Image (spheres, rainbow, N blue to C red):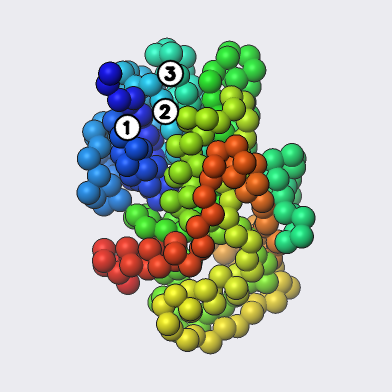
Amino acid sequence: MYPEKVLVTGATGLLGSNIAAELLHRGYEVRVLLRKSSNPIALKGLDVELFYGDITNAIDINAAAQGCNIIIHSAANTSQWGLESHLHDAVNIQGTQNVLNAVKKWGIERFVHVSTANMFRPGSRTQPGDETGSFSYTKLRTDYIDTKNRAQQLVLESVKNENIPAIVVNPTFMIGARDAKPSSGKMVLYYLKTPLVICPTGGKNFVPVQDVAVGAVNAAARGRIGECYLLAGENLTYQEFFKKINAVTGRTKPFFTAPSALLKTAGHAGDAISKLLGKRIPLSYTNTSMLTIDNYYTPQKAITELAMPQTPIEQAIKEAVNWFAQNGYC
């Protein structure tokens, strides 16, 4: 009997590459979709089948999916700034629809859609958000969050209306190796490169990317169709997270906690500059406001139903730091 073949989209990113590694570890055959212009460094050392194509091209997706049993769709435009909304639409919405169409065309047995924890209302340390919380980011809108919300709804509606065998996983803020872009690893690199660590007042849920990869692969094997699973780890303030990097690296850096009012004022100034320049810049009221909130979640459902591990975040920090150093990022 031949092993199952899995198509992974977004495989040159932090999560997609770790999902590919986890699948190979379990004996699956792995095909990855990537553009010819993509940097494949995150796939270094992985015996995967490379299929060149674009998530926005339906013909490419259909060809990539042919012969596969499972699809894990982690491709996304995660940029929070600097892009027109139609570029988010093309990848996050149309790309997801293309994959759904391929699932139907080829009778894919299981489809895991990677969404984001932002689809659910966050909570406090004592009452963290879970999968029952409604979407609550309508006031702090970004094209990324908006399009990921619409894409998740596409997937869930396809389960109800077309019997698509889909499961949704919703990772929090991932830390670990193979962050080639880099994405969430920018926070680790910021710490490594800055002489003064400026900490926002809020916090978020930090999770080892390898734990998320295990959760996503387990979702393909045992997740309940039509369900969403928060793939979460440890709830920490930003200062607590940076202090963990301190401990892991053995470095001691001064910290400055930026008051919420100061961050929001800077965000308003960024919006004014953006309007004046006629283009989006990283500094915005939405982005700075996100840094001041408690963005906390619980992984309990994923632990119970997907046997998701809970590795200490220190291990993920160590792996991220080592990978960045080995690949010339710092």
* In front: label 2 or label 1: 1
What type is the residue that disc 3 sits on?
Ile
Q: Residue at x 55, y 31 (%)?
A: 223
Q: Which mark is residue 108?
A: 3
* In front: label 1 or label 3: 1
Q: Which residue is mark 1?
A: 28
Reply above or below: 125 against 69. below
x, y (%) of residue 303?
Answer: 59, 45
Query: What whole-number distance in Å separates the C-alpha atoms at marks 1 and 3?
Result: 15 Å
What type is the residue that disc 2 sits on?
Ile
Q: Secondary structure at mark 2?
A: strand
Q: Earlier in the sequence, mark 1 or mark 3?
A: 1
Q: Earlier in the sequence, mark 2 or mark 1?
A: 1
**CB contact under 8 Å: marks 1 and 3:** no
Reply above or below: 166 against 169. above
Q: State the residue in front, 277 or 186.
A: 186
Where the N terminus falls, by quadrant? top left
x, y (%) of residue 228?
Answer: 62, 35
x, y (%) of residue 90?
Answer: 47, 33
Q: Which residue is mark 2?
A: 71
Q: State the residue in front, 85 or 183.
A: 183
Query: What whole-number distance in Å separates the C-alpha atoms at marks 2 and 1?
Result: 12 Å
Q: Residue at x 73, y 73 (%)?
A: 261
